[in-house]
Amino acid sequence: MLPLRDQLNGLLTILMYTFRKVILSRRIVITLLIAAFVAVVALYVGGQDVERLKDGTNLLDSLILFFFMPVLAMIYGSSLLRDEMDDRSITQVVTSPMDRLFIYTGYYLGLVVSVSALMLIVLTAGFLSFFGRAGIDGDAMGIYGSMAGLMVIGSIVYSALFMAVSVILDRPIYFGLFYAFIWEAFIGSLPGKIGTLAVKHYVRSIGAGWIHYGEISEFPASSMGDSAWVLLILTVILFVFGAYMFREKEFA
Amino acid sequence: MSAQPIQSGPYAGWVPVAPPAPGAIISARALSKWYGEVIGLNSFELDVLPGITGLVGPNGSGKSTLFKLVSGLIRPSVGTVTVLGQDPWANPPLMARIGLCPDYDNLPGEQTGRALLRFVGGLRGMTGPKLAARIEEVARIVNMAPHMDRRMGGYSKGMRQRMKIAASMLHEPELLLLDEPLSGTDPLGRRELIDLVHALHKEHGHNVVVSSHVLHEIERLTSKVAVVYKGRAVATGDIHEIRDLIDRHPHNIIVESDRLEELARRFVGMPTVVSVQYGEGRRSLVVQVSKPDEFFNAMPSIVGELGADMHKMQSLDDDLESVFRYLVR
């Protein structure tokens, strides 16, 4: 096996390759369109008679964190490895002397960084459009920072989920559509315990501890610490499961 | 190659698994691979010794399945395969000693050749000036140095094949696995690739296993062959004996070019050509030849003289089938 230093160099190679591939792929148009859509909506809302911090938070929460976060993670997460398996460009990678755990980790970290970057583009577009009109101050920047943190957390968890699914299923996009649009959007919105079965419940619960404006601050949450633990354990389980399946996978 | 059944004792009638032949770099014993109900390899037995070895057989005979087993992409359903003395499945250290050039086109079109080799080198622990120097060296070896900064989407088929070979040999593996490297290339490109494979062994010291569904192509690469048919190695040894068999069967070659009429006129005058006819829609020629190697050797000069643009030149599998059937009788 390659020495650890070379394995880490290989991991970094895959991470950078993944990031470039995501950022330079034609799918970036999807992100730019979403960012443009968010910007137009935020610009319009920002021009209305609004409570700046409360309504600005609600806008970023409902439009970006609540909806586009799982959707974008699904689009990229379910296709990254699967596309390479389908066009068999992954052959170069899996016939290298790297342990497949490092290979999987490289792809996963590349996906997390890419999805985080894309979400930050969308968030920034929405934030600047709304608060640029309504007024940017320290509180607004605090909301931006907290939202950005939640995006990164969401990217970490959703990437683990959708990448694991893409290793197992030949058509992960169908699961992804079901999960992003039905499970997260619908089940996650239901009152009572059933809402705790969605990832966004825990992401918003953490957000409730960070943000002091808007509905997210009053979210009937699990505690911030418990939510962090749930997301951490869920991510580790999904990552280990995905990495194990990838290690055992045959590339016919 | 197959071991004899045990004659007496509690294991009477059992067939022991023979050990790898001394010095074998690849050894397969009772090797089978199924894809659901489809059989890829069936009780496959083979020893590959150092040097250049050819695997020949029709499409779907199991050549690519063997390459995938040898390079650890898939694992055997039954039996064993050892490569350089080791089991290739889940064996990353062994991958440092193997280079695979697959039969499918897996080059990302939006990347440049140099970016691909940088990526491949990074996966193999190569960095910095050492990697840059090796990329230059490999680019020269495969005759791609002037094209390294072009996007691979604009490469010709022959260039793509050479770039795949470059990627497979970048880390200086002991064993190179070239799966159908000549497939789809024009006559000139084919000649260059054949010279390249010779050079990879003679000048750069790689052991090479190369596959093709066209016997005479393999003949130009090596005299050591294994004939693969329906998932089994049906014959191994010297190619000339196998070629004698195939020469007794007419060989069909399909040719696509912008100068079909002129080519047809030239073909008719060649002693090796038995018949020439237009293919469907008059977009191709189907040429039946008695000595395919003579025909293929003559092609580069004919193409050059006519200034023809060759779109495709490919042997059809059908004519090999009768030989393979003969071998497995």
Image (tube, coloured by chain):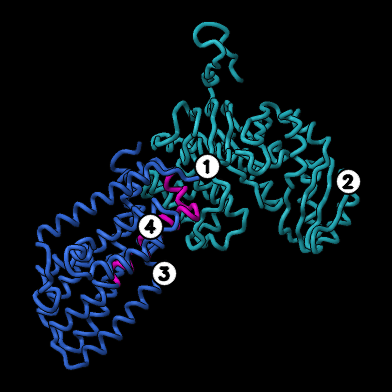
Chain colours: A blue, B cyan
Q: Main secondary structure of the magenta part?
A: helix
Query: Which is nearer the N-term, disc 2 or disc 1?
Result: 1
Q: Are marks 1 and 4 on the same chain?
A: no
Taking depth in this image into account, of A222 and A94 the one nearest to the observer is A222
Pointer 1: what residue?
B36
Q: Nearer the viewer, mark 3 or mark 4?
A: 3
In the displayed structure, does residue B198 sit left or right of residue A63? right
Q: Which mark is residue A27?
A: 3
Task: Determine the chain carrying the residue at label 2.
Answer: B
* Place of residue A215 in the rendered image (x, y in percent of width and height, measured from the top left): 14, 77
Magenta stretch: give its range: A68-94
Give me the C-alpha separation between circle 1 and circle 4.
34 Å
In the displayed structure, does residue B7 sit left or right of residue B229? left
Instruction: Name which residue type carries label 2.
Output: Val
Asked whether residue A187 is drawn in magenta, I would say no
Query: What is the secondary structure assignment of the residue under circle 4?
Result: helix
Asked if the residue at tag 3 contacts the one at tag 2, i.e. Cβ–Cβ closer than 8 Å, the answer is no
**Quarter of the image containing the N terminus of chain B?**
top right
Q: Which mark is residue B274?
A: 2
Image point (49%, 52%), residue name: A88
Q: Which mark is residue B199?
A: none
Query: Which is nearer the N-term, disc 3 or disc 4?
Result: 4
